[in-house]
């Protein structure tokens, strides 16, 4: 039996085991998928091999650490320098990023988007900034401090800290921070968020399965919005396809994984 897992801190909230196990059951595949809480991202590779895994997903805050520990990185992950999917191939750890394509599929319902403001500067923000640029949408990154902005500055993105940011209209406000995941925090100070929402056309939170304080304020504003469920599904389908080495059609995987959301 092949074993898969998701690594993160926190990770108890993750729907990934339900999604992937439902696919395995539906397709009669001898495999199982679990959660692995990992506080020290530098141990990810060691734990992966100690558990004899065939593949894994990576969530906050370890996507950049996963990138650094791969034997080989493929696709858009090489540009993003953050990995959310690991596959064991001939004893080597191969890294991919399915967040980028998953996110672009998820935001299609917002219609035409020209620019977007990304809140946060972690691995997910890296993936979404690259995905947006490839989709000819101009991203701006807003982070609490300059500490994690070097990657974005080197990539030529417009970046701001809270203290040097001036609000302007954006078609989409995207929260990639963990604010609201296990606390009641907002991703930016409330007065700043209110000003942003007054001039925005839509908003999305990559957190799923709960109404975060951020989404609560978005709902009150009356803007079109989404949580991270659609992105979770789309990136999960792509990750599962990689886990199974392309042996099953993506449509078949997506059909099964979509049904898991009704459980």
Image (tube, helix red, strand yellow):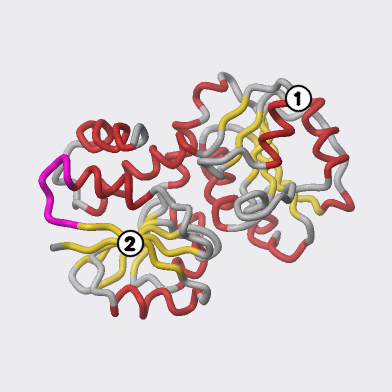
Look at the image and tell me in which quarter the N terminus lies.
Answer: bottom left
Q: Is residue 185 above or below residue 95?
A: above
> Which mark, residue 221?
1
Crowding near the residue tagged with mark 1, few <14, some 14–19, many ≥20 C-alpha atoms within 10 Å: some
Q: Secondary structure at mark 2?
A: strand
Residue at the image position 55 percent from the left and 63 percent from the top: 61
Q: Secondary structure at mark 1?
A: helix
Contact between marks 2 and 1 (CB within 8 A): the answer is no
Q: Is residue 159 above or below residue 150?
A: above
Crowding near the residue tagged with mark 2, few <14, some 14–19, many ≥20 C-alpha atoms within 10 Å: many
The residue segment tinted magenta is 25-31
Q: Where's residue 228, x and y in %?
A: 52, 39
Q: Is residue 65 above or below residue 238?
A: below
Residue at the image position 74 percent from the left and 66 percent from the top: 147
Q: Is residue 238 above or below residue 204?
A: below
Q: Identify which residue, 191 or 165, lies in the foreground.
A: 191
Q: Where's residue 17, x and y in %?
A: 33, 52
Q: Is residue 119 left or right of residue 209?
A: right
Q: Identify which residue, 69 or 226, lies in the foreground.
A: 226
Q: Is residue 96 left or right of residue 20?
A: right
Q: Where's residue 175, x and y in %?
A: 65, 43
Q: Residue 73: which quarter of the image?
A: bottom left
The verdict on residue 208 being magenta is no
């Amino acid at each position: 039996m092949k074993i898969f897992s998701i690594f993160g801190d926190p990770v108890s909230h993750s729907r990934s085991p339900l999604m992937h196990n439902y696919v395995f059951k539906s397709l009669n595949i001898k495999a199982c998928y679990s959660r692995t809480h990992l506080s020290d991202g530098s141990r990810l590779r060691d734990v992966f091999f100690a558990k004899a895994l065939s593949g894994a997903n990576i969530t906050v805050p370890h996507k950049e650490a996963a990138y650094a520990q791969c034997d080989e990185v493929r696709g858009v992950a090489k540009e993003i320098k953050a990995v959310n999917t690991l596959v064991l191939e001939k004893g080597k750890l191969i890294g991919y990023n399915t967040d980028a394509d998953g996110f672009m599929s998820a935001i299609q319902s917002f219609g035409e988007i020209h620019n977007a403001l990304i809140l946060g500067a972690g691995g997910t923000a890296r993936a979404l900034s690259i995905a947006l640029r490839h989709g000819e949408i101009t991203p701006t990154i807003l982070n609490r401090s300059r500490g994690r902005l070097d990657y974005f500055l080197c990539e030529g993105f417009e970046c701001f800290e809270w203290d040097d940011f001036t609000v302007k209209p954006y078609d989409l406000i995207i929260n990639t921070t963990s604010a609201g995941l296990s606390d009641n925090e907002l991703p930016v100070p409330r007065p700043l968020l209110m000003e942003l929402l007054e001039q925005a056309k839509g908003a999305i939170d990559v957190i799923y399965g709960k109404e975060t304080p951020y989404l609560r304020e978005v709902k009150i504003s009356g803007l079109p919005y989404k949580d991270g469920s659609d992105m979770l599904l789309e990136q999960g389908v792509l990750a599962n396809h990689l886990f199974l080495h392309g042996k099953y059609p993506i449509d078949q995987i997506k059909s099964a994984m979509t049904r898991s959301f009704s459980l």
